[in-house]
Image (cartoon, coloured by chain):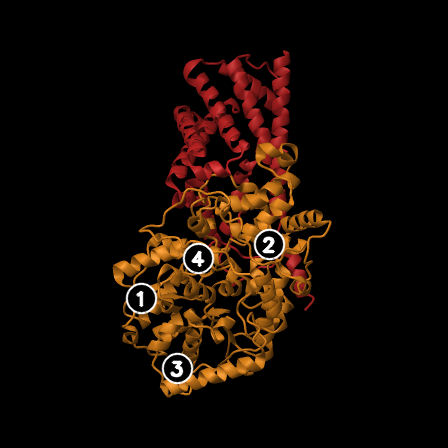
Chain colours: A red, B orange
Amino acid sequence: MSTVTMIYAGMFYIATLLLVVGLAYKIFDYSRTPAPLKIPTTPAPTTQKGVVYRMAKEVVLFESLFKSNKWIWVFGYLFHFGLFLVLARHLRYFTEPVWFWVGIVQPFGKYASIMMVAGLAGLLARRFLVDRVRYISTPSDYLMLVLLIAIGLSGMLMTFVAHTDIVALKGFFMGLMYLDVQPVPQDPILLVHLALVALLMVIFPISKLLHAPGVFFSPTRNQVDNPREHRHVAAWAARLDQNN
Amino acid sequence: MAAAEFDIPEIKDDIEVPRLREGVMAHAKSFIAGEAVQSFMGYPHELGEDWKERALDKMGDLLGKYRSLKVFLDACVHCGACTDKCHYYLGTSDPKNMPVARQDLMRQVYRRYFTPAGKLFPKLVGAKDLTKEVLDDWYSYYYQCSECRRCSVFCPYGIDTAEITMAGREILNHVGMGQKYSNEILGKVQKIGNNLGLPGPALEDTLEGLAEDIEADTGVAVKMPLDVKGAEVLLVTPSADFFSEPHVESLIGYAKVFHAAGISWTLSSHASEAGNFGLFDANYDVMRKVAMRIRDAALELGVKRIVVGECGHAWRVAYSFWNTLTGIGYGGNDPFSIELQKQLDPTYPQPQHICELTNDLIKSGKIKVDPSANDDLVVTYHDSCNVARASRMGTEPGGQFAIPRELIKSVANNFHNMADDTIYESTFCCGGGGGLLTDDLMEVRVKGALPRATALNNVVKEHQVNFMATICAICKAQFTKVLPKYGFDMGMVGGVHQLVSKAIKLD
C-alpha cells in the first residue's frame, strides 16, 4: 500500500471521528443546557405540530432569511440546495448497489455544482462589496467560503474537464467503510479535493458550521407559544419554588 | 452633568440604511450605578483586581443555564441579514449597533475562552482577549440595545440579540459596572413596590384624586380601589399610569371599563407595578423576586383574575414568564403553582391583557361605546416591541396585532396603519425600551426613534394622522419626549384606553 493511500486513509478515519464525536458532543451539550424561559419569537405556533412546520420552513426554505434580505437568500439558497444535490450525488461512492434515488439524482447533482459555486461566489462578493458585511467579516469567514469554493471547483474540474478514476475512488471509500483499505487514485486534483473535504469535516464541529445543528436548538424557533396554558420550568429554576 | 449636544437626524421619505461610521456612538454611556444601588442588588460597585475572572466565571455560569446564549454564540455565520434591521444602527450608523456586531462584542470573548478554535487561532476567527476596552464597549453598546427582538425575526437561526445583551449586562453587573437607571429602579420596586418609588399612602391619595376628577368630569362615581380583599380582578399596571401624562388617561379608561362592566377590581399597593426591569438582565432570581410581588398580592387579596395594564415589557414578563416564575397561569402540577391556580377563575386567561378584556366586553355587548367621540382623531397604532415579538393576546398567533386594532376601530372611526415593514412583527422599537429610558441616553433615544418617526411622518402626510396609540408605558414616555424633537406634537401619543375612555358610555 502506498504512503499516499495510508495518509488519506488515516486522514479520513481521523476526520470522520472528529466530525462525529465533535458534533455528537455539541448536540449533547445543547440538549443538556436548559432553556429556562419561554422565548419564541412571536407570532409563534401554539402547538408542537405547528413548531415542526415552522422549523421545516426555516430549514427547507430559509423563511426568515427570505423576509430579511433577498440577495443573501438567493446566494445562500443556491449554495445550500446545490450542496444538497451534490452530496446526494456523492452517495454513489458509498453505496453498493447504488440506491435507486441516488441514481436518479446523478445528472441534477452534476449541474448543481454550478449553483453551489455561484452561490458561494455571491456570498463572497458580498463580504467584499457591502460595507456592513465587510465590517463583520473575520478572516475565517472569507477562508470558509474560499475552502468551499475550492472543494466545488476541484470537484467540477473532475466532473467536467479532467475525469478521475471514480471506480478506484469508490473502491477506496468502500474499503474504508469495510476496514479493508484499497489504494486511492493518485490524481492531484482528486487528492486536493479529498484533503479539503477532510479539512472541512474537521472544522465543522468547532466553527460557525454549527449553525446546522444549532438552528434546531434555537429557542426562538423551536418553542411552542403556550406559556399561559402550560407551566414551563427548568430543573435549576424549579428548586427556587421549593424555598417559598 | 448635562448630556452632550447632538444633531437631530433628518426625517427622509423612506427609512434609509446608512453607510457605517465607526465609533460615532462609543461616547454614549449611561451613568454607572453607585455603591448603595449595587450593594442592595448584591453586586460590587467597582472593578476589583479579579474582574476578569469574575466576568468569565459569570459567562460560564450563564452559558450553562441558558441554551439560547450557548446556541446563539455558536450559530451565527456572519451572513449580514440583521445588519440593517436595528433601529439604533439605522438612526446612528455606528456599526457596533448592528445586531451581529453587538453580539460579536461577546462572541469574540466567548470564542477566545470557551472554544478550541478561538483558543488556538484567535486572530483567524476574530477572537479577542477580555480587556478593559472590550468591557467598556460592552457597557456602551449593551445599553444601546433595547432588547426589542427585531433582529431575531430576520435571523435565519432566530438569534435574538436581546439574549446576548441581557447576558452582557448581567456580567457587567457582576464586575461592578451596573447601570444606575435600571438598578435603581430594581431597588425601588423591591423596597417600595413600584418603579417610581411611590409609597402606599401617596398612591392612595393619587387614586382618590383621580376618582374625584372622573366624577367631576362625567358625573359618574367611578372608583379607583386599592387593596380591596375579595375583589374579582387584581389589576397590575405600570406605575407611570398613576400620574404620568398621557399614561393616566389610560388608567382612567381601565377604571371606566371595570365600572361599566360591573366587575369588582382592585389595585395593590404591594404590587403597584407591572413593569419588571429584571427582564433586562439575565438575572432570573431578580426577575422572579419582582414578579413574586404579584403572586403574593393575588394570594393576599384572594382575587379570581389577574389583568395587566398597558405596558410592553411587563406584558412580555406576564404573558411569557409569570407562569414559569410564579405559577400565575395554568397547567402547574406542583404544590407551589396549585396553591394559586386553584384560586383563579379558569374561564379566563391568566394573566389577561386589559385589551383582551375590554375587546371581549365590547364584542359581547357588555359595555357600550360611541366611536364618534373620537371623530376629532385620525389614529394609527404603534406595535410595542415586547407585545409584538414576545407575547400574544387571544387564542390565535398574531392576536397581539389584531386585538388592539380591533379595539381601536371599535372606539374610533378613523384608523390607518403605518407601512407594513414598520408594524406587526417588523415593528420598530420606540427607541427607549430595555432600560434606556433615561436622560443620560437621550442621544441614543432620539436617534433610535428615527425609523418610527419616519413611518409616522408618512401617515401624517398621507392620512393626516394626528394620534398614535400604543400600549406601553415606556413607548408613551419615550415618544412624548422624543417625537417633539422631530417636530411632532407630544399630545399625539397616547394609550389605547385613552381612546376607550373617551368613547365608553357610563350609566
Q: Amino acid at mark 4?
A: Val
To the question of a shared chain for discs 3 and 1, the answer is yes
Please state which of the two labelled residues, at mark 4 or mark 1, is closer to the viewer.
4
Q: Amino acid at mark 3?
A: Ala
Which residue, given by chain and number where applicable, does mark 1 sit on?
A: B466
Quadrant position of the N terminus of chain A in the picture: top right
Give the label on residue B251, or none.
none
Please state which of the two labelled residues, at mark 4 or mark 2, is closer to the viewer.
4
**Cα gap from disc 4 to disc 3, whole angstroms:** 39 Å
Q: Position of residue A146 (x, y in %)?
A: 49, 27
Please state which of the two labelled residues, at mark 3 or mark 1, is closer to the viewer.
1
Q: Amino acid at mark 1?
A: Asn
Whether residues under marks 4 and 1 lie with C-beta atoms below 8 angstroms apart, the answer is no
To the question of a shared chain for discs 4 and 3, the answer is yes
Which residue, given by chain and number where applicable, does mark 3 sit on?
A: B260
* Element assignment for label 3: helix
* Element assignment for label 1: loop
Q: Position of residue A70 (x, y in %)?
A: 37, 40
Indicate which disc, 3 or 1, sits on the residue closer to the N terminus.
3
Q: In percent of the image, x 40 and y 78: which residue is there?
A: B257
Quadrant position of the C terminus of chain A in the picture: bottom right
The reply to whether residue B237 is in sight is: no
Task: Report crowding for label 1: few under 14, some 14 to 19, many 20 or more residues within 10 A (C-alpha).
Answer: some
